[in-house]
Image: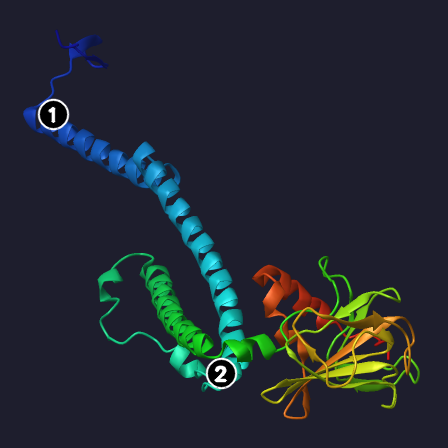
């Protein structure tokens, strides 16, 4: 039963019933509905800005996870690119040179994938750029891997025809260095131990106690085993053919003589400190067509990729040489 409202009439000094017309009722109803609708809209709008529904929270979590996964994928791709660059560099500067095959240009290795609309299917999303860039990187890496694979196939074919050549190339470390701690100084500018001046060091110094065995790094013929070369002291030179010669200096004594044939891994002498040397060590050099080159590029024969990378770091340290 609807409530009856009254008002006090001061003239008649009595309470009289309030009569509400239909227009007033309709007006009040409309005002109420309009106010309710406006309040509801404001509540929903403001709430949507500061509060999320369970579904929205779930979608946002998925979105954050997707962004995290893409960032992790990008890091992995950068690591893959770094390893691939090292392989490509060794392929061009070592393997292909060995077999007199022309290097593969960087433009050819890193060329993009053709097609203007190749990645158009990824347009229209909030993070389209991330998705497109990731797919571009993957496509380029796949192409580079394909090119590198074909290059290695070519090298393998050449290797089958040149087994003797491979046996002759200096390809192992000349002293036992399983723990990779014996490199004291690498190829490049180093501090001279006697003059303290910056001077180009044309080989690699392996620190080792006197009497440590020294091994031939490739098949060849002994061309020198004497102490008649200034600064080297007792030293051995091996002619490997194909323009390659290796030199082993500051030896304590020899285990070979001139014109003797040796195989990779044969004992040729012992570490010493003869000649211009500040401590017992082996100074090791490689010549290609009478030009001294960095021996670090010739240790592929007995090292894993990880070990070779560690050796590169040690050999690149700018320090004082031992001769």
* Residue 75 sits above or below residue 243 on the image: above
Q: Is residue 150 above or below residue 130?
A: below
- Residue 189 in the image: x percent, y percent? 77, 83
Query: Circle 1 is placed at which residue position?
Result: 25
Instruction: From the image, state whether disc 2 or disc 1 is nearer to you.
Output: 2
Q: Nearer the viewer, residue 46 or 161?
A: 161
Q: Residue at x 46, y 53 (%)?
A: 72
- Tag 1: Cα neighbours inside 10 Å, few (<14), some, or many (≥20)? few
Q: Is residue 49 visible?
A: no
Work out which quarter of the rendered image holds the C terminus and state it: bottom right
58 and 322: which is toward the camera: 322
In the current view of this chain or complex, which residue is farthest to the left?
22
Question: Which residue ends up furthest to the bottom in the rendered image?
Answer: 290
* Residue 62, quarter of the rendered image: top left
Within 10 Å of the Cα at label 2, are there few (<14), some (14-19), or many (20+) other Cα atoms? some
Q: Is residue 163 above or below residue 200?
A: above
Pick the residue in front: 232 or 17: 232
Q: Quadrant of the N terminus?
A: top left
Residue pictured at 77% horizontal, 85% vertical: 258
Please give the count of numbered marks on the rendered protein: 2
Point out residue 26 in the picture as x, y percentages from the top left corner: 10, 28
The circle drawn on residue 99 is 2
Front one among 102 and 312: 102
Q: Which numbered disc flags the more N-terminal residue, 2 or 1?
A: 1
Circles 2 and 1: CB distance less than 8 Å? no
SS at circle 2: loop
Q: Could you say where residue 75 lies in the image, as x and y percent from the top left?
A: 49, 58
Residue 314 visible at all = yes
- The answer to which quarter of the image holds residue 136 is bottom left
């Amino acid at each position: 039963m609807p409530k009856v409202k009254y008002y006090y009439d001061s003239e008649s000094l009595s309470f009289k019933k309030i009569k509400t017309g239909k227009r007033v009722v309709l007006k009040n109803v409309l005002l109420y509905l309009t106010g309710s609708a406006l309040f509801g809209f404001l509540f929903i709008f403001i709430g949507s800005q500061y509060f999320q529904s369970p579904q929205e929270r779930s979608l946002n979590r998925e979105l954050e996870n997707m962004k995290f996964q893409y960032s992790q994928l990008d890091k992995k791709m950068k690591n893959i690119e770094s390893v691939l660059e090292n392989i490509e560099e060794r392929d061009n500067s070592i393997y292909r040179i060995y077999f007199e095959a022309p290097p593969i240009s960087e433009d050819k290795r890193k060329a993009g994938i053709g097609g203007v609309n190749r990645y158009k299917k990824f347009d229209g999303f909030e993070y389209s750029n991330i998705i497109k860039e990731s797919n571009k990187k993957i496509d380029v890496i796949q192409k580079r891997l394909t090119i590198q694979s074909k290059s290695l196939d070519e090298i393998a074919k050449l290797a089958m025809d040149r087994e003797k050549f491979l046996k002759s190339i200096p390809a192992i470390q000349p002293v036992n260095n399983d723990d990779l701690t014996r490199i004291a100084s690498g190829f490049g500018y180093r501090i001279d131990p006697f003059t303290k001046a910056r001077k180009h060091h044309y080989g690699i110094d392996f620190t080792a106690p006197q009497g440590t065995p020294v091994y031939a790094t490739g098949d060849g013929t002994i061309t020198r085993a004497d102490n008649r070369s200034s600064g080297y002291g007792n030293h051995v030179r091996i002619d490997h053919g194909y323009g390659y010669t290796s030199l082993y200096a500051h030896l304590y004594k020899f285990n070979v003589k001139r014109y003797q044939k040796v195989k990779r891994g044969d004992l040729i002498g012992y570490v010493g400190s003869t000649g211009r040397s500040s401590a017992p060590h082996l100074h090791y050099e490689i010549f290609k067509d009478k030009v001294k080159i960095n021996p670090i590029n010739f240790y592929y024969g007995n090292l894993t990729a990880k070990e070779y990378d560690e050796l590169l770091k040690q050999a690149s340290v700018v320090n004082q040489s031992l001769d």
